[in-house]
Image: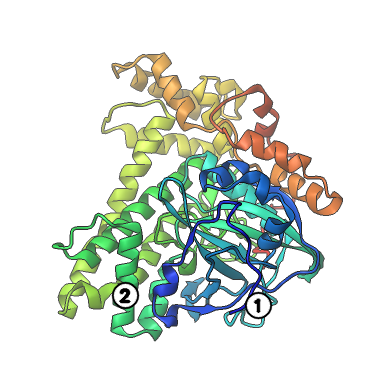
Amino acid sequence: MTEKKTTTQTGWNLDNSYAHLPQLFFTSLNPTPVHAPKLVILNHPLAESLGFNTRALEGEESIELFAGNRVPEGAWPLAQAYAGHQFGYFTMLGDGRAVLLGEQITPLGERFDIQLKGSGVTPYSRRGDGRAALGPMLREYIISEAMHGLGIATTRSLAVVTTGESVIRETVQPGAILTRVAASHLRVGTFQYASKWGTAQELKDLADYTLQRHFPDVNTDENRYLVLLQEVIKRQAALIAKWQLVGFIHGVMNTDNMAISGETIDYGPCAFMDAYDPETVFSSIDSQGRYAYGNQPNIAVWNLARLAETLLPLLHENQVQAVELAQDAISDFTKLYHRYWMAGMRAKLGIFNEEKQDEALIEDIHSVMQKYRADYTNTFRALTFDRPKDTVLANTPEFDKWHELWLKRLSRQPESIDAAHQLMQNSNPALIPRNHWVEDAIDAAVKRGDYSVMNKLLEVLSKPYAYSAQQADYAALPVPSNCAYRTFCGT
């Protein structure tokens, strides 16, 4: 393999543990060079945490790297193979437009994948051009950083470069490459791929690698592959609960978009809910509502069941007992999710302890919000300061009754009302990446080359619980429209 390499002065410290898995799991190849790359945004805080010299990352040599024209010292570029159920249908997939450069070892000894997204054709491209458009890459940058600010496990975006080339989707659009940072890119679909096309040993190699990378403390005397399944279930239950608590809708919860690490991954047709409605769907391709807001926990169970199926040969040599172990593990998801969600909802309502009637109280406020199409985020924002007049719920009989019960509930706990409101402020974001603000930022960048709108949005999204004065405008609702908001994969 021949390629131009960068110096290590920028702070690259790469390892390539994934490349030591069996050849089945990847194809070694370099990114496809582009014509005229230009750095349009760099994530300075993330870069510093990864051990990079941010000034050097803004230099010409690093821009060439972000574009795939060079590779850093120690890189082993490769495209990962995986499969997945897409809208319930199983298919062979893989990195069709992405190349993993390697794993950056940070000054704290942490390990993160560094991947170029939009870096050219790979053996898994399936007739695609391997490229990405600027708009969707900026969208992933904005939403992933917003999720990080909200305290939700997520892949992150280190940089976006334009390529100086165009890509053709429905229209001609400027091309771009995003540098994605992840705990790993291991997916449920990776295990499905191993189960379908690999040997028993290759499946075991993948499971052992996953345990070593993400669950190193697993006791070898236990059924380690059962523990692997249980730990993934725990992380996904916690993750999906956090999605629901902030009104996040992933939009395309295929099994290849569920990360084993428990991070949110692949920001395609994602968006945040405005008016509360469990049936909310934004994705233009989800015509049946498979991935609607209210269905996300059920889809998580379905995806995890697919993971469990791949692990059956490792769970027990007896098929019947293996299935029983898998079913018991999967059944834990609903209990775990409910526990995490209830804890989060109590915090959003300023409740420190537990009472049996809490669930009814929580269900009732959701029912009232749905009936009056109250904004999800701003309703809890108003409750945080006990200003119901700031919502459409004010003076409705259902809300007035609920509000009285809520105040009585707060009075029954030993913590003060001030403490309750502080808990609420720490649990209810002052703002989310509203769809109209995200679109404005993307339009300004793509159509006018103006990144100031995006930078201002990113600044306020970085501290969503600050309740600062500059965040007020970003909490405003969009102008009513007769057209439903729709998002697109951008592939």
Residue 307 numbered mark, or none: none
What amino acid is found at the position of numbered circle 2 in the picture? Asp
Measured from the top left, where is residue 99 in percent x and y? 58, 69
- Taking the spot 45% from the left edge, 61% from the top edge, the residue there is 184
- Please say whether residue 486 is visible from this viewpoint: no
- Please say whether residue 385 is visible from this viewpoint: yes
Measured from the top left, where is residue 236 in percent x and y? 38, 55
Is 410 rendered above or below residue 324? above
The residue identified by callout 1 is 121
Give SS at disc 1. loop
Instruction: Give the residue at the far right of this rendering.
Output: 448
Estimate the spatial distance between the alpha carbons at disc 2 and disc 1, rounded to whole Å. Answer: 28 Å
In this view, the residue in front, 219 or 401, is 219
In this view, the residue in front, 156 or 425, is 156
Report the quarter where the C terminus lies: bottom right
Query: 10 Å neighbourhood of mark 1: few (<14), some, or many (≥20)?
Result: many
- Taking the spot 78% from the left edge, 71% from the top edge, the residue there is 168
Residue 205 numbered mark, or none: 2
Report the quarter where the N terminus lies: bottom right
Residue 183 as seen in the image, left or right of residue 277: left
Residue 277 as seen in the image, left or right of residue 295: right
Measured from the top left, where is residue 369 in percent x and y? 52, 37
Which quadrant would residue 452 be assigned to in this image? Answer: top right
